[in-house]
Image (tube, grey):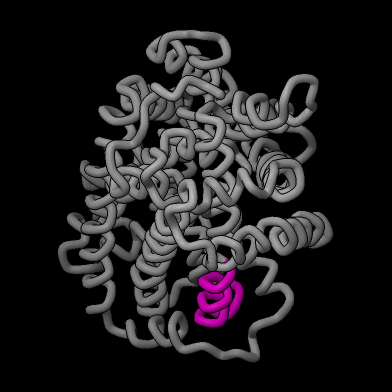
Amino acid sequence: MADKKRETFGSKLGLIMATAGSALGLGNIYRFPCEAGANGGAAFLIVYLAIALLIGTPLMVAEFIIGRRSKSNAVGAFKVLSGTGSAWPLLGYLGVLCAFLILAFYTTVAGWTLGYLGKAAAGHFSGQDLASIQQQFSSFTNHPWLPIVCQLAFLALTAVVVMRGVKDGIERWSKILMPMLLVIMVVLCVKSLTLSGAAEGLAFFFKPDFSKITGRVLISALGQSFFSLSIGMGALITYGSYISRKDNMVSSAVGVTLADTLVAVLAGVIIFPAAFSFGIQPEAGASLAFTTLPMVFQQMTGGYFFCLMFFLLLVIATLTSTISLLEVIVATLTEELHLSRTKAALVGAAGTAVIGVLATLSFRAGSPLHIGSSTVFDLLDHATALYLMPIGGLLIVLFLGWKMKRADVMDELTNGGTLRTGIRKAIYLIIRYLAPVAIAVIFVSQLVMR
């Protein structure tokens, strides 16, 4: 087995904060409300919560088990647990590749959040109409160098945190950033709830119409849960390897799922009352964050302050995710190639920057960085979301449920027999039988529905 002296999280709170930070990001802030808006509001929320707890949590536990049992990175974990001559380590490389590609295009949007935090601080949205704000977004993404500078600055910030290691870097900053994120979201929720017409938005989000629960809603909720909880990209295996033997993985996974869902719900409480108050479609995606919401904020009393807070929120949410993605790469480089953490962080960040800059440049009008009608950003997004993550997640549950010995899995679930086995046996059965079917449904359905 791998070196037992490797770093671990210093506390259960640190584990939950760091892992929740991995799961939380731009997807929770605007993708979840968009999915809810397009799929029945409260009906989607109920289905999502049930699936996140019943399917998403066991999937997270599965990756935690692989990580803690091996005490290794995403690649080394499968080398340790599958034995010599096995093809399973390829699954680890798949996870690292997935994390690398996601980080590459994610830093494009990360750069936007940093740039827009600067715009909000400078008051660039004050007194502007929607057309002017939309033009600002177009001008920013088409600027010859500003988006790239913002992207590289964000990537450098991520690398600095990861260089500090698990306790002094990832855990410490997660304990700072996650509470900040929650405080800012609560303040924005309170402000949104004071808007005229907020009650209509709340009713849409919290008053279910069960007739709207269709097959499409179930599939959308499955997909949102899968991607929101960072399944299949190596991050949870890597973080799992930092979990100490005394920590309860099941309760930690439940805590992460609840924190992830709480942030998604708070995002809905911010967005839906505001959207209904100003007559804006709530499923507007990226334009909701970068064009529509600045318009909403500048019509509010204290709009400058709340707009500034919102983009600070986006920066924090994005940073907690980029940290976990870069850590997947760094852990692999330090343990497989024996690089120092500092050198691994620099190599990982530099490699990411090469692909990430191409993704950013592909947004410019007339850019040659297109394949057909798709930008480099689109291709990376589709490759990871539609193929790599679902395939990785499916193979992970098959590995744990059918390759690993049941006794080893239960030993991890029960912390060597010190925890009750009842619910843990149920989790094992979900991982072995139900989860593979659920992930296969997500994968196939997304291919069919494209």
* Residue at image coords 40%, 54%: 252
Residues shaded magenta: 38-51
Q: Is residue 396 above or below residue 147?
A: below
Q: Which one is in front, 321 or 361?
A: 321
Image quadrant where one finds the C terminus: bottom right
Q: Viewed as shown, does residue 218 lie left or right of 69?
A: right
Residue 53 image position (x, y, % from top left): 52, 67
Image quadrant where one finds the N terminus: top right
Tell me where residue 197 sits by quadrant. Answer: bottom left
Q: Which one is in front, 254 or 18?
A: 254
Q: Which one is in front, 288 or 252?
A: 252
Q: Is residue 14 above or below residue 353?
A: below
Residue 438 image position (x, y, % from top left): 72, 62
Q: Which one is in front, 94 or 7?
A: 7
Residue 178 image position (x, y, % from top left): 29, 49
* Residue at image coords 59%, 69%: 51
Q: Viewed as shown, does residue 175 lie left or right of 112?
A: left
Q: How many numbered discs, if any?
A: 0
